[in-house]
Image: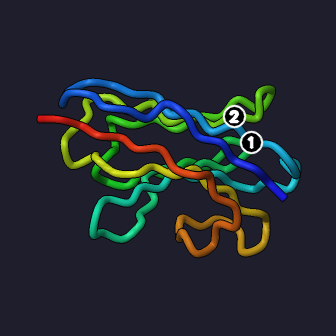
């Protein structure tokens, strides 16, 4: 089993920044990719950013390109999401998730087996 614990959410004004952290424990050697997902009220969960554990592949949804950066620190088994120039439409619960090697690269939430508890990000206008 892989355990994920997120931190770093909160309330910020539009234009501000937050950094989310996801501490990974358990079977980390079996982790193939990590993703940050978000779910706003009444909307489907979407992949905001994803990274292959080796760091060789990264993905960003169009709405966050140039504003968000996903990174990982292998020594600390931690994945980060740096969020800059935040907008009210970024308001959502943000989840960290992990997937194994089966199926290869994916940004579909259904392909991620392990999830954190979620952290609220609220951007005020």
- At horizontal 59% and vertical 67% (from top left) the residue drawn is 106
Instruction: State the image coordinates of residue 117 (x, y, percent, origin top left).
Output: 58, 52
Q: Is residue 123 left or right of residue 80?
A: left
Residue tagged by mark 2? 78
Instruction: State the image coordinates of residue 99 (x, y, percent, origin top left).
Output: 71, 62
Q: Residues within 10 Å of mark 1 (few under 14, many from 20)?
A: many
Question: Which comes before the other along the chain, label 1 or label 2?
Answer: 1
Q: Is residue 91 left or right of residue 32?
A: left
Residue tagged by mark 1? 24
For the N terminus, the image quarter is: bottom right
- At horizontal 26% and vertical 34% (from top left) the residue drawn is 86
Please say if the residues under marks 1 and 2 sit with CB atoms less than 8 Å apart: yes
Q: Quadrant of residue 77?
A: top right
Image height of 53 relative to 115, above or below = above
- At horizontal 57% and vertical 33% (from top left) the residue drawn is 21
Instruction: State the image coordinates of residue 52 (x, y, percent, origin top left).
Output: 67, 50
- At horizontal 38% and vertical 32% (from top left) the residue drawn is 10
* Residue that extends furthest to the left in the rendered view of this protein: 125
Instruction: State the image coordinates of residue 53 (x, y, percent, origin top left).
Output: 72, 46
Q: Quadrant of residue 16?
A: top left
Q: Nearer the viewer, residue 51 or 111?
A: 111
Q: Nearer the viewer, residue 86 or 107?
A: 86
């Amino acid at each position: 089993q892989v355990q994920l614990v997120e931190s770093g959410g909160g309330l910020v004004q539009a234009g501000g920044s937050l950094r989310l952290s996801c501490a990974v424990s358990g079977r980390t050697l079996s982790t193939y990719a990590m993703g940050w997902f978000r779910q706003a009220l009444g909307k489907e969960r979407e992949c905001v950013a994803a990274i292959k554990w080796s760091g060789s592949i990264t993905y960003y949804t169009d709405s966050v390109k140039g504003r968000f950066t996903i990174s990982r620190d292998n020594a600390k088994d931690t994945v980060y999401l740096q969020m800059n120039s935040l907008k009210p439409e970024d308001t959502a619960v943000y989840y960290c998730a992990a997937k194994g090697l089966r199926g290869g690269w994916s940004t579909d939430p259904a392909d991620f087996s392990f999830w954190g508890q979620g952290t609220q990000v609220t951007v005020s206008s």
